[in-house]
Image: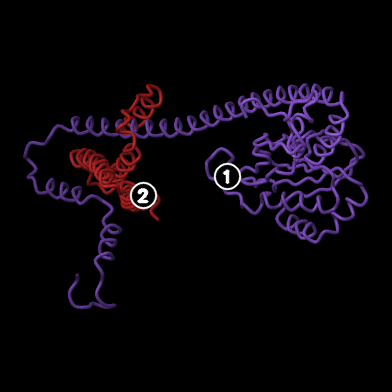
């Protein structure tokens, strides 16, 4: 329950405070969001599996976001930013899909 | 690479990588942590639970914040693009207005020049002859407004489909469903061939040197953009014009083509319509071919006696 409240608080905070992101970081936001979604779905599934661990969740979230942004940053420097973004989105998207399917199996038993 | 073939042969590295990605959707660290927890004896001190919960809530808040910020940014980007587009359209409208004003002014001044010239020329017999010749040439060069019965041909793009987004940059409309410069050229040429004496497209009179061409998405007539629907007005003998135009094989193929591609292609007769004068080309060179400057120069300047293919009033600075 508390994590859901935290998520809602974050969304509301972002919508109402409307914080400005430095221009240099803006290209990495969508990728960071996808990485964050992956970590959140993973955490939710681990919780349903009964093996959730706060430390693992926190570390996986932070490292996911940072690594995804770093990969894209590196790609930008090498001139393959768009392709690497696609790669990151594909891999994370598959994981999100897999975790969502596992969550669905837990919730609906199907 | 994998070793000896198992089953269906050696598996490529790419396939096994994909297998990993597909099979291992959950971070293995969770399972390891769970195993580590299970291994710890029951009596050992445990980390305080509230700290973990606060951290998780904090991370979730950050995730929400990220989502909200990104959403905001994407929405602002779309709105910004729309705003820029609107500003550009305003700019175009304003400059078009300025250009129209200038053209009006130019027409006014041209009329004044023409009147003064006509008065001067009419004073002498040589001048009168030059004036007659000039009038004939001007009629041929579409430099005069004309009124008379005529044909109104309307061409228009196919109506856009419902799922088309007019704001987004991607114009997914089939280019074949748009009127091309070639279609307009075909219609205009067919009208000339049918005996039209004067033609205008959306109020742009066609002179001898007027071009109809494409520039990006817009059709340019005399280097001014015209948009769908294109109304081609042609003045001439109504009956023969109509009959010859309709019987023109190119027009018939265009008509069947427009039917297939849902283009609008209408024909209407008008008892009277007025076409404006075309913009006359600038005077670039003038050759004096009169008998003798001294003999011709009775009251008129030499440039007034130039061959009437060009209008003898050089635009200032042109």
Q: What residue lies at 81% left-to-right and 39% top-to-bottom? A: B137
Marked residue chain, label 2:
A
Q: Quadrant of the N terminus of chain A?
A: top left
- Do the residues indicated by labels 1 and 2 lie within the same chain of the protein? no
Q: What residue lies at 75% left-to-right and 41% top-to-bottom? A: B206
User: Chain B hue?
Assistant: purple
Tell me which chain appears red: A
Give the structural element (helix, strand or loop) at label 1: loop
- Report crowding for label 2: few under 14, some 14 to 19, many 20 or more residues within 10 A (C-alpha): some
Residue bearing the label numbered 2 = A100
Whether B259 is drawn above or below B1: the answer is above
Q: What residue lies at 66% left-to-right and 52% top-to-bottom? A: B177
Whether B18 is drawn above or below B233: the answer is below
With B161 as the anchor, is B301 left or right in this view? right
Quarter of the image for residue B273 reads: top right
Where residue B233 appears, as percent x and y from the top left, is 81, 42
Whether A15 is drawn above or below B5: the answer is above
Residue bearing the label numbered 1 = B216
Q: Nearer the viewer, residue B108 or A7?
A: B108
């Amino acid at each position: 329950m508390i994590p859901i409240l935290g998520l809602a608080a974050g969304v509301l905070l972002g919508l109402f405070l409307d914080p400005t992101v430095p221009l240099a970081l803006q290209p990495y936001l969508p990728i960071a969001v996808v990485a964050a979604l992956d970590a959140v779905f993973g955490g939710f599934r681990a919780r349903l599996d009964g093996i959730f661990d706060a430390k693992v969740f926190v570390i996986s979230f932070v490292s996911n976001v940072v690594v995804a942004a770093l990969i894209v940053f590196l790609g930008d420097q090498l001139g393959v930013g768009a392709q690497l973004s696609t790669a990151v989105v594909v891999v994370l998207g598959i994981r999100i899909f897999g975790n969502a399917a596992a969550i669905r199996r837990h919730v609906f038993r199907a | 690479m994998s070793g000896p073939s198992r089953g269906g042969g050696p598996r490529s590295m790419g396939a096994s990588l994909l297998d990993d990605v597909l099979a291992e959707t959950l971070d293995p660290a969770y399972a390891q942590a769970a195993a580590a927890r299970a291994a710890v004896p029951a009596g050992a001190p445990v980390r305080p639970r509230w700290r973990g919960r606060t951290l998780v809530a904090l991370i979730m808040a950050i995730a929400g914040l990220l989502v909200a910020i990104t959403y905001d940014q994407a929405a602002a980007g779309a709105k910004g693009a729309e705003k820029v587009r609107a500003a550009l359209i305003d700019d175009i409208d304003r400059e078009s207005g300025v250009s129209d004003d200038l053209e009006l002014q130019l027409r006014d001044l041209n009329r004044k020049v023409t009147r003064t010239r006509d008065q001067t020329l009419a004073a002498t017999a040589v001048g009168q002859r030059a004036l007659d010749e000039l009038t004939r040439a001007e009629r041929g060069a579409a430099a005069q407004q004309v009124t008379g019965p005529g044909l109104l041909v309307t061409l228009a793009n196919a109506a856009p489909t419902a799922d088309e987004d007019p704001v987004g940059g991607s114009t997914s409309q089939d280019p074949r469903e748009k009127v091309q410069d070639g279609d307009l050229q075909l219609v205009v040429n067919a009208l000339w061939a049918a005996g039209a004496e004067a033609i205008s497209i959306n109020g742009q009179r066609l002179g001898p040197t007027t071009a109809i061409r494409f520039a990006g998405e817009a059709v340019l007539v005399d280097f001014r953009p015209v948009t769908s629907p294109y109304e081609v007005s042609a003045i001439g003998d109504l009956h023969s014009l109509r009959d010859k135009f309709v019987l023109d094989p190119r027009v018939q193929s265009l008509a069947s083509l427009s039917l297939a591609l849902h283009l609008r292609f209408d024909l209407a007769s008008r008892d009277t319509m007025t076409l404006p004068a075309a913009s006359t080309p600038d005077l670039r060179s003038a050759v004096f071919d009169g008998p003798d400057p001294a003999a011709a120069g009775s009251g008129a300047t030499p440039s007034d006696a130039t061959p009437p293919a060009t209008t003898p009033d050089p635009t200032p600075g042109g």
